[in-house]
Amino acid sequence: MRILTALAAAAVMAMPASAVTIFSQNFDSAPRANNTTNVPGFTVTGGVDIVSNGTAGVLCAGAAGRCLDLVGSPNVGSVTSDPIGFNAGRVITVSFAVSGNPRAGTPADIFNFALGFTDPENIAVFTLISGFQGSYGSTGPGISTMGTYTESLVRNRPFVSYALSFVPTSAGSLLLTFGGAGPNDSAGPIIDNILVDSAVPEPSTWLMLIAGFGMVGVAARRRRSSVAA
């Protein structure tokens, strides 16, 4: 336990004091397309629209470039990122922008978001930074998914920035899923500016991170004891 704690502390303090972007997609370089299943960096279920700013009244983030309509023309869709690798002991920050669809005469948009992992992870710290309504996410060992966050978006709602962060105690890969739900009306939530950053934890999070490494050690000892029994 003492060795694990010392190694964890040394690993954190040895990290370079910088943040790096490990995934970015603002759709500006993606070809404009309706009901497409081809979105760079993502696997598409159903269909989505890659739209240019101003198309059918849709405004992309910053009123420029392109963005993603999560209800294609005419299929309800979702997109799941390719695995995004991260290192142990870093603060992983996920951010994105979401708006309602401005097309008139249709019901509210239903937006779904899920954060998952390719293998179970021990999460020492999890923080909602902005955008999310209510609770989402958790900490502890053996986490494969944080579940699905769902929000009803009023039509014409402007873009809101969503952000969360977490600190894993082992290297791994995350998966981001964004989806629309509700009527198949070719007008869904608009998503833009998806970003994943990796940074050194602040000193205030080091103790929680070291405790997280300790949890991994305790779990490993319990597994060895079970095998020996």
Image (cartoon, helix red, strand yellow):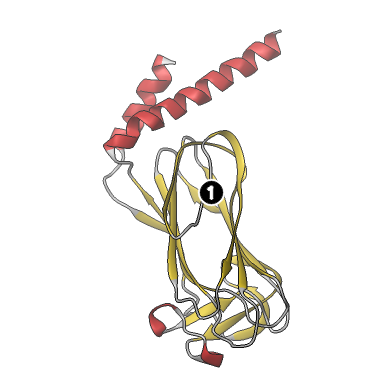
Q: How many dots with numbers?
A: 1
Q: Quadrant of residue 8?
A: top left
Apparent side of residue 104 relative to residue 131 in the rendered image (left or right):
right
Image location of residue 84, percent across then percent down: 53, 54
**Residue 150 vs residue 161: left or right?**
right
- Residue at (44% x, 68% y) in the render: 160
| Amino acid bearing label 1 | Tyr
On-image quarter of the N terminus: top left
Tell me the SS state at disc 1.
Answer: loop
Where residue 79 appears, as percent x and y from the top left, is 63, 66
| Quadrant in which residue 48 is drawn | bottom right
Q: What residue does disc 1 label?
A: 136
Compared with 5, 94 (above or below) is below
Which of these two is toward me, 149 or 30?
A: 149
Q: Count residues near mark 1 (Cα–Cα under 10 Å), then give few for <14, some for 14-19, many for 20+.
A: some
| Residue at 58% across, 74% down | 189
Residue 131 seen from this side: yes
Residue sitting at x 28%, y 44%: 16
Q: Residue at x 44, y 83 (%)?
A: 65
Q: Is residue 82 visible?
A: no
Q: Is residue 168 left or right of residue 178?
A: left
Quadrant containing the C terminus is top right
Q: Position of residue 91 (x, y in %)?
A: 39, 45
Outermost residue, top direction? Answer: 229
Q: From the top left corner, tell me how far across and down residue 105 is, in percent.
A: 63, 87
Above or below 38: residue 93? above
